[in-house]
Amino acid sequence: MSTPHIAAEPGAIATSLLMPGDPLRAKFIAEHFLCDVTPFNKIRNILGFTGTYKGRPVSVMGSGMGMPSLGIYAHELYTQYNVERIIRVGSCGAYTRALSLFDVLVANSAWTESTFARFYSGHDCKIAYPHHDLNMQLFSTARAMGVEDRLQLARVHSSDVFYRHDAEDYRDIYRDYGCVAVEMEAFALFHIAQTLQKQAACLLTVSDCLETGAAVTSKQREQAFTSMIELALETLVE
Ligand code: HPA
């Protein structure tokens, strides 16, 4: 079986899937966290792997950057490969000094300026929500792991534009829509999942702060990701 962007055999993808933006991070997760790993996709180097975590099947696949890219993969995974749950694990830029580098956010909603929903489902909404039960499960797993106090619920801005000509207009988005951080994919994931009656959630590590200009190094980014990935994997195999 093959879809335009994923070449996987039937049953080669688990029903629970972890989705970082970077395909090389998907490879890193497969190599460092999963056992019995089999690759299932190489098309366009959007690498996908299935393995086991604590004996339970789980897949990991990159989304690429931005909602058009994530939208392609999430749609094909949900509609053609029987994927039921996707947890995005990504990084975000903080809009407020109330957040610090390395803080881990659980998105409780994503606001966007994008027309993605209008053209995906015909519903021109600008706010999308994760699956309630999956979000609750993230917190109960975090509690069991003793890391619940490190999580913060947050509305995020899913932006179509990384380099904005007016570098200060994020302040309006913070003020008007209550978004405390920016990334580029969560809205599309939530909207697709909701439309298809599937499950989605999103964990984000703060990698930079727009107010202060502070940013983590790439090495630090790798380490910061580890706790988020463990939490997502523990949640997916529960
Ligand atoms: N903008 C958009 N996406 C991001 C950022 C940012 O500043 N940081 C991490 N992901």
Image (tube, helix red, strand yellow):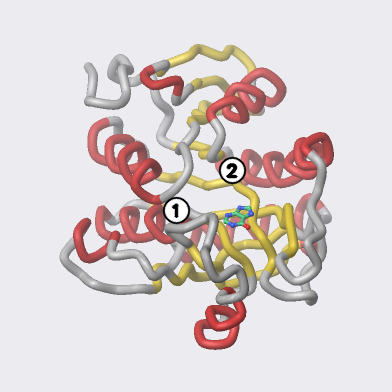
Q: In this view of the protein, which residue sits in the foreground, 67 or 75?
A: 67
Q: Position of residue 40 (x, y in %)?
A: 42, 16
**Residue in the image at 51% along x and 82% along y:** 177
Position of residue 114 in the picture relative to residue 235 (left or right): left
Q: In this view of the protein, which residue sits in the foreground, 127 or 37?
A: 127
Q: Residue 238, labelled with which disc?
A: 2
- The quadrant of the picture occupied by the N terminus is top left
Q: CA distance from mark 2 to mark 1?
A: 15 Å
**Residue in the image at 79% along x and 75% along y:** 97
Crowd class of label 2 (few under 14; some 14 to 19; many from 20; radius 10 Å) = few
Which is closer to the viewer, label 2 or label 1? 1
Ligand 1's quadrant: bottom right
Residue reaching furthest to the bottom: 176
**Residue 103 location, quadrant:** bottom right
- The quadrant of the picture occupied by the C terminus is top right
Q: Position of residue 112 (x, y in %)?
A: 42, 68
Q: Residue 200, labelled with which disc?
A: 1
Q: Is residue 126 above or below residue 201?
A: below
**Residue in the image at 69% along x and 26% along y:** 33
Q: Position of residue 180 (x, y in %)?
A: 63, 73
Position of residue 36 in the picture relative to residue 112 (left or right): right
**Residue in the image at 42% along x and 61% along y:** 187
Q: Amino acid at mark 1?
A: Ala
Q: Position of residue 231 (x, y in %)?
A: 69, 46
SS class, disc 1: strand
Residue 164 in sight from this viewpoint: yes
SS class, disc 2: loop
Residue 149 in sight from this viewpoint: no
Q: Amino acid at mark 2?
A: Glu
Position of residue 194 in the picture relative to residue 186 (left or right): left
